[in-house]
Amino acid sequence: MQSIDVGVDFHPRLANRDKKQGDGKYNAIDFRNKYLQPLDAKEQWKIQEPYIGFDFKNVNKIGPSFANEAFAYFAKYASPELILKRIQLINTTEVQLRIIKAELNAGYNRE
C-alpha cells in the first residue's frame, strides 16, 4: 500500500472543495484526481484491501467541503466503513477524523 504525507506532498491546509472556493488552490477535486482516480469505478470497491494511506501528521486543517468532495464522493460506490478500509487515514487528529467521518456518513453532497 502506498502512503502519502498529505501535508508535504499536497498541502497542509485542506479547505477548498473546488477551484471556485477560497483561492481555488489545493482543492479536493485536484486531490481526488491526483491520488484516488483509480477508485472512481464501481468494480474497484469489490476489493477489500487497503488501496492507499494518507498520513495527516503535517496537515493543520481539513474542512468539511474538502472532506466531502475528496472522500464522501466515493459513497456512491461504497459504505463509509469500506471507504475507510480502502483509504487508510493515518495520524489524524480527533477533529480531522470526526470531520471526515461526518461527511462520509452524510454521503456525497455536491454543492
Image (cartoon, rainbow, N blue to C red):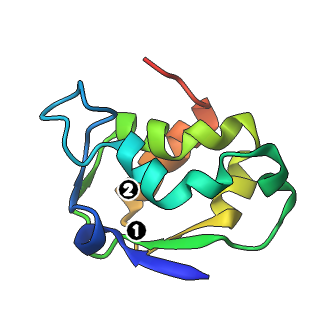
Please say if 65 is above or below 91: above
Residue 38: % across, % down:
64, 56
Q: Residues within 10 Å of mark 2 (few under 14, many from 20)?
A: many
Q: Is residue 98 visible?
A: no
Q: Which residue is mark 2?
A: 96
- Say which element carries label 1: loop
Q: Residue at x 40, y 61 (%)?
A: 94
Q: Which residue is mark 1?
A: 92
Residue 69: % across, % down:
46, 37
Quadrant of residue 64 within the rendered picture: top left
Judge from the rendering whether residue 34 lies leftward or rightward of residue 80; answer left or right: left
Residue 84: % across, % down:
64, 60
Do residues under tags 2 and 1 come within 8 Å of each other at their CB atoms?
A: yes
Amino acid type of the residue tagged 1 in the rendering: Thr
Residue 37: % across, % down:
57, 52
Quadrant of residue 36 within the rendered picture: bottom right
Quarter of the picture containing the C terminus is top left
Quarter of the picture containing the N terminus is bottom right
Amino acid type of the residue tagged 2 in the rendering: Gln
Judge from the rendering whether residue 69 lies leftward or rightward of residue 11; answer left or right: right
Q: Residue at x 47, y 37 (%)?
A: 68
The count of marks equals 2
Q: Is residue 31 visible?
A: yes
* Cα distance between the residues tagged 2 and 1: 6 Å
Q: Residue at x 74, y 46 (%)?
A: 41
